[in-house]
Image (cartoon, rainbow, N blue to C red):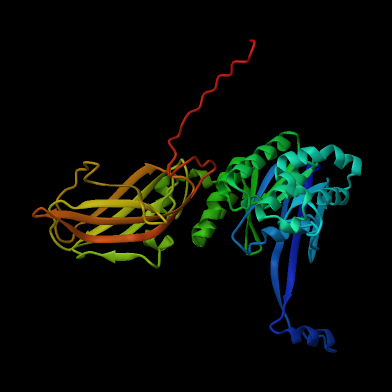
Amino acid sequence: MSVESNKNVISVNNITKIYKLYDKPIDRLKESLSLSHKSFHRDFYALNGISFHVEKGQTVGIIGTNGSGKSTILKIITGVLTPTTGELKVNGVISALLELGGGFNMDYTGIENIYMNGTMMGFSRKDMDEKLQDILDFADIGDFVYQPVKTYSSGMFVRLAFALAINVEPEILIVDEALSVGDVFFQAKCYRRMEEIRQNGTTILMVTHDMGAIIKYCDRVVVLNKGNFIAEGESGKMVDLYKKILANQMDDLGEDLEEIREGTLNDFSGEQAAQRHEGLMKDRLTINPARTEYGDKRAEIVDFGLLDAKGNVTNLLLKGERFTIKERIHFSTEIETPIFTYTIKDKRGADLTGTNTMYETSDVKSVKKGDEYEVEFNQKMTLQGGEYLLSMSCTGFENGEHVVYHRLYDIASITVISNKNTVGVYDMESKVSLKLSRAGE
C-alpha cells in the first residue's frame, strides 16, 4: 500500500463497512425490542479494513468483480455512505458521477438541474452562467435540455450528468461506470476531456470494468475482492491479478501476491511461469458447459491451455500481446499424419481466424500407439476487445477421406481486453502520420 503523505488528496485508512442482514423482517423488530440484546442478524462486510491513498494529480483505478466493494468505497469517499469503522480524509472539492442521474430532480429540466447541482457543489449562479455553454456544448443533447429529465433516454442522461461533472473544474473527479451507458463516440469524447483535466492537475478516481481504459489512463490501480484489499500498483500488474480472480485462479493469485511482497514478480520467464504449476492446464481455464465434443477418439486431446505472454493459463488476453494455444494429444493407435488445429469464432458462430499444422507446413511425424504430441500455436492477439469462442481438434486424411479423431467445439471462451478498438473484427495496426498545411503559410 502507498504511504500517506502531505501530497495525498484522498486517504482511506482501515475503513470497514458492515451491513446487518436479517433472514426475516420481523427479526429486526425482535432485535430492537430484546431486553437481553440478543442478536437476530449476521454481519456482512461490504468492506473489510481497506486502506489506500491517492496523490494530487494522479489517476487511480479501482477494479474487482461485482460485489467486491468498489462502489461502496466510492460512496464513502463522496459522503453518500458513512463507514462503520476507519478514517477518511479528503482534501479538495469532489465532483462525482456515481449513479446515473444521482442528484438530479426528475421533474426539473436539464437547465434547472445544471443550476441546482452547481449550487449544491458551491458555485454561484454567476459561476454557472459562465460554465453553462461549455456544459451544453459537451452534452450535445439539443433542445432536450429544456425538457424534464424524466423524458431523457439513458444516453442523454449520462451525457448531461458527465458534461456537468467534468466542466465545473473539479479538484477531484470520481467516476463509477457512468461511461458504460454512452455510445462509443461519447465515451471517446469523455476520455479526451478527462485527459485534459488530468493534465491540468485534477485528481481522478475511477471504477470501470473496461480494463483497456484502466491500462491506458491509470497511474495506479487498487484491486479489491469480496470487500478485501488485494493489492495496488502499476496497472498492467494489477490487471494480471484481476484476470486470475475472474478465472478463479486463487492459488495463482496467492503466489503472485507473495512474489509482489518479495519483489520477484517480474523475475519469472513465461516458461518458468508455466512450469511452476502442476496438474492439467484445462483445469485452470473456464470451460464452456455447452461445448460439443466428437470424434472416434483414436487420438484424444487430453489437455489444453490458453497462455498469455507471461505463460499464465487464462481465458483473458490483452489485445496486442502474444499468446499461445497449447494442446496435448494422446494416440491409441498408429496414425500416418495427424493434423492439429484451432479456430476462434465470435459469439454468433462465425469463424474469425484459425490455422492448423497442415496450413503451417509443420513437420508432423507419424505416430504409434501410446505416443503423445504436444503442440503450441503462438501468435499475436489482433482481434478487437470482446468475447470469443475457442475450438480445437486433431484430424487427418485416410484413403482420401477427412477423418475427425477428436474435436472440442466451442470448448472455452476468450475475453480480449483492449484499450483501443478499431472498426471491424481485427486491428490492422495502422500507423498514422499527419501533415497540416495552414492557409496562407
* 224 over 217 or under it: above or below: below
* 8 over 43 or under it: above or below: above
Q: Is residue 199 visible?
A: yes
Residue at 60% x, 46% y is 214
Residue that lies at the very extreme toward the bottom in this rendered image? 35
Residue at 25% x, 42% y is 360
The answer to which of 383 and 320 lies nearer the viewer is 383
**Image coords of residue 248 (percent x, y):** 50, 62
Q: Is residue 3 visible?
A: no
Q: Quadrant of residue 302?
A: bottom left
**Residue 370 as seen in the image, left or right of residue 308:** left
**Image coords of residue 80 (percent x, y):** 80, 60
* 26 over 383 or under it: above or below: below
**Residue 174 as seen in the image, left or right of residue 262:** right
| Quarter containing the C terminus | top right
**Image coords of residue 107 (percent x, y):** 80, 59
The answer to which of 198 and 143 lies nearer the viewer is 143
